[in-house]
Image (cartoon, grey):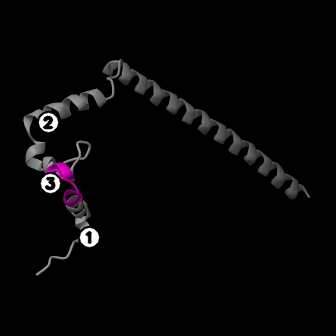
Amino acid sequence: MEVLPNSYDSDALDCNERSNHSNQSEPEACFSKSEVLWETWTPKTLKRPELLESKNKEWIKRRRPTAECSADALLREKIELVKLLKRNAEEEGNLKILILKEQLKQETIKTDKLLKD
């Protein structure tokens, strides 16, 4: 009984073809040094202490540098920002009130003119 090739095993087929055409042993024919051996990607091997240490070192290098300002300074800046937003909201509210008062004046003038006529 002949086993039909699986389309997902194309890498394995390529590996077999390369090993048949070359004088190298099978592992050498299948993988060059630049290719990744997927056997090293198992959860058990990924949790080895050497790999965890290197991951931690890489993570520390990639990590964003810490902020120079202290927590108190950051809190003060946030408080100032909230005060600024509050002041802006009050100014906008006062402008809207003035606009509405002016519109009310215009409407009262119109109604007075209509009532006089």
Please tell me which residue is depicted at 19% across the width and 34% down the height of the picture.
55
Q: Main secondary structure of the magenta part?
A: helix
The amino acid type of the residue labelled 3 equals: Glu
Magenta span covers which residues?
A: 18-29
First in sequence: mark 2 vs mark 1: 1
Cα gap from disc 2 to disc 1, whole angstroms: 33 Å
Q: Position of residue 42 (x, y in %)?
A: 12, 50
* Residue that label 3 marks: 26
Please tell me which residue is depicted at 36% across the width and 24% down the height of the picture.
75
- The residue carrying pointer 1 sits among few (fewer than 14), some (14 to 19) or many (20 or more) residues within 10 Å by Cα, namely few
* Residue that label 1 marks: 7
Q: The residue tagged with tag 2: helix, strand or loop?
A: helix
Please tell me which residue is depicted at 26% across the width and 64% down the height of the picture.
10
Q: Position of residue 115 (x, y in %)?
A: 85, 57
First in sequence: mark 3 vs mark 1: 1
Cα gap from disc 3 to disc 1, whole angstroms: 21 Å
Q: Nearer the viewer, mark 2 or mark 1?
A: 1
Q: Position of residue 40 (x, y in %)?
A: 14, 46
Cα gap from disc 2 to disc 3, whole angstroms: 27 Å
Q: In the displayed structure, does residue 105 sit left or right of residue 23?
A: right
Of residues 18 and 61, the one drawn nearer to the viewer in this rendering? 18
Q: The residue tagged with tag 1: helix, strand or loop?
A: helix
